[in-house]
Amino acid sequence: MEHSSGPLNLCHVLTKSIIINRTHMLVHATALSALIYYRASFFFSESKSRDRATTLACLTMFLAELGLSFLWLLSQAFRWRPVRRTAFPKRLPEDKELPPIDVFVCTADPDKEPTVNVMNTVVSAMGLDYPPEKLHVYLSDDGGSTLTLHGTREAYDFARWWLPFCKRYGIKTRCPKAFFKEEEDGEGIGMSSENEFGSGKKIVKEKYELFKERVNKYRKRHRGDSSHTGRDHPPTIEVIRGNVPDEVMQAHQDPMPKLIHVSREKRPSHHHHFKVGALNVLLRVSGVMSNSPFILVLDCDMYCNDPSSVRQAMFFHLDPRLSPSLMLVQFPQMFHNISENDIYDSKIRRYFSTCCVGMDGLKGPILSGSCSYIKRESLYRKPMQEGFDLMDLKKLFGHSNEFIRYLWQKEKPNRNTIAGDSAALMKETQVLTSCGYENGTNWGQEVGFMYNSVVEDYFTSFTLHCKGWTSVFYTPSKPQFLGTATTNLNDMLIQGMRWYSGLSRVGISRFCPLIYGSSRMPILQSMCYAEVSLLPLYCLPICCFATIPQICLVNGISIYPEVSSSYIMLFAFIFLSSLCKHLYEVVTSGHSVQTFLNEQRIWMIKSTTCYVYGTIDAIMTQIGMRTASFLPTNKVDDDEQSKRYEMGIFDFQTSIMFLSPMVTLVILNMASFTGGVARVLTLGGFDKLFMQIALSFFVLVMSYPVIEAMVLRTDKGCIPRSVTMLSAFLSLVLLLLGSSFLM
Ligand SMILES: O=c1ccn([C@@H]2O[C@H](COP(=O)(O)OP(=O)(O)O[C@H]3O[C@H](CO)[C@@H](O)[C@H](O)[C@H]3O)[C@@H](O)[C@H]2O)c(=O)[nH]1
Ligand SMILES: [Mn+2]
């Protein structure tokens, strides 16, 4: 479907990065081999100076070093062949040749996900720069809330004013909330309010305020009067027509994209599989309503910031060189509420600028759950797979003949675009959204988005990559989507715990990427998947590094080479080489040294909190002692917390479960650093203990915000005295236990 001569897009291999990365890999790997040789030879040498304590401590550290080296090795797959993509907008086919699109927006909890914000996402999706008759927006409401349904109707009414306004004046920011904020901040398109645009803007602003007011009024009036809950409700499907009768809207007869509200049936007796269950329901409902070959998946907070994203995705999906095996085009998740300092690494820079870019040069990035244009067919079968008989299809997809009839849209795309909500069609959708529909089928196992992990995005794209599909990562200069990032420690750690539990669950299951993936995809691609799923395992070496050298230091046990030995250079080199490489990656991705420090610190914090709990949770879920859970992340701002975040001040208002391990380790390092310095001053042995003193010092420098919140701060975000006392006690116990174990 190429329009004019030349391809729709190009993929550039980043040669300079490749040379630097591979050279660094070679040098660093050589140094690591030397370290392994040094440690191993220690155990095989016949030294008299070796006592039980030193052997035990050195053995544990050796295992920790091996663990770190293994994870480092896996992470090199991302650095092997990074690429960048460009596209040629002028070569895209004309509108009439473009395929239809279904947009899936998921929401679950009107308390944590404010309805007005969800509707902003919905309206921004309706505003995508695409022929309206080819665009269908499906909103999944997992909470089964009448507020969301009411809000959707109101949003549709508002969109009737908003979309023509955007079209008329070429407005690029089609999320109303973002548009009005830009205008307030003086970043808008800057026409005076005297002219036609000004009066048009005044009208839509009034309509927007009215829309917000009506939604909020409804929320107040109907709070708590619903007879059903988020876990127990019947299905409802509604093709939205708005609250205002059509004749009132005479002036706005422009064709509008279809908006469909879907709330699947949920019963306590049936596992609903959280977001991924909702996505599979949308897949079926849209399958009988519009059945578009491409699907944009959005979280309810991820609004479309650039209406052209859909066309940008088509540069790849319509490219005949890529298209036969291309399952998805992933845009980076970006966030509108990140402060300059970004103390919690809410941007997840490493993932989007190193991992995704690196995987793009292999078989393609992991699905990120949002901001991705997915090919419907990829969720149904392997690339180019033919030959199913009807019984096979029913076993895979369930008993709906209607759904199966429209399954292979490829032969005749767009044959079932919503003509109206005829009674028969509505009845069919009720069947498809019922909670028992999937019984005895292969939904979530063979077809659709995959169950078995709360990180459905990761696991779905893993299985699809295993089946031979590929994906593309594309980062245009303007952020295509903007979401709400977690900007306080508590939300970040809770979200992290869910992610790392879901990821480790895959890592420890039969789908472990290194085993299951390596025979089904190139080894480098499976290493990337493995690194992501085993990421929480960083907790093991990091917790060793934060305790063992320190306990040994207090006891005068040396576990590193002496300052006078040349081997100390080896340890120093490995330490500096990994820090420098990280710094290089941060700086070349356009970030500051401060970002580098923040990322290091957050990595340490996560390693001692959510990586640990995530792994424990995954193990318990795997052996059946727990059931998986997915509490939606809070998307409501707390003013005081937001202020602290903006100022770059850590907010430690979180549970004791997260605080105590972190604070315990910091206190242990404080104690060992002071004890160690006192020891070398009085008893000598600086030469032997220097590395351990330096390590404790490094941990303390990186943990400065924790120390400050413990010792100096008294505001609401500080670390409570009780936690400090408990942690001091725990670190004493740790020190005594460790010492007695070693002695
Ligand atoms: O039972 C549920 C729970 C959540 N959601 C929706 O899922 C989306 C993502 O949930 P959120 O709470 O924002 O989780 P995050 O951790 O921020 O989401 C990231 O991680 C998820 C995997 O854990 C991915 O699905 C997301 O796309 C990705 O942005 C939201 O729109 C929710 O409304 C549901 O529809 N049903
Ligand atoms: Mn989210």
Image: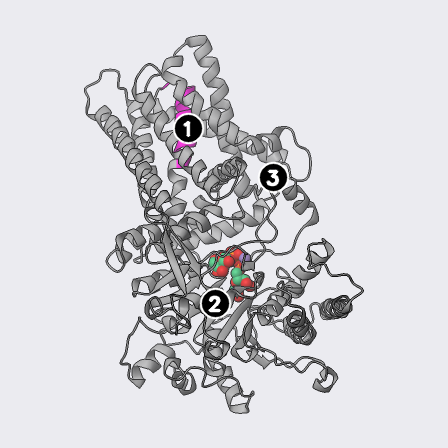
Mark toward the viewer: 1 or 2: 2
Identify the residue at horizontal 66%, vertical 59% (top origin): 178
- Looking at the picture, tell me which residue is in the foreground, 419 or 17: 17
Q: Is residue 390 left or right of residue 639?
A: left
The residue segment tinted magenta is 542-557
Identify the residue at horizontal 41%, vertical 68% (top origin): 317
Residue on which disc 3 sits? 650
Residue 43 got which mark? none
Q: Circle 3 — which element?
A: loop
Residue 323 image position (x, y, % from top left): 36, 69
User: Are the residues tagged 1 and 3 within 8 Å (C-beta)?
Assistant: no
Residue 430 image position (x, y, % from top left): 51, 82
Residue on which disc 1 sits? 737
Q: Earlier in the sequence, mark 1 or mark 2?
A: 2
Disc 1 residue type (three-letter): Leu
How many other residues sit within 10 Å of disc 2, few (<14), some (14-19) or many (≥20)?
Answer: few
Question: CA separation, marks 1 and 2?
Answer: 69 Å
* One can see residue 507 in this view: yes
Mark toward the viewer: 2 or 3: 2
Residue 308 image position (x, y, % from top left): 54, 66
Residue on which disc 2 sits? 90
Q: Residue 451: which quarter of the image?
A: bottom left
Q: Circle 2 — which element?
A: helix
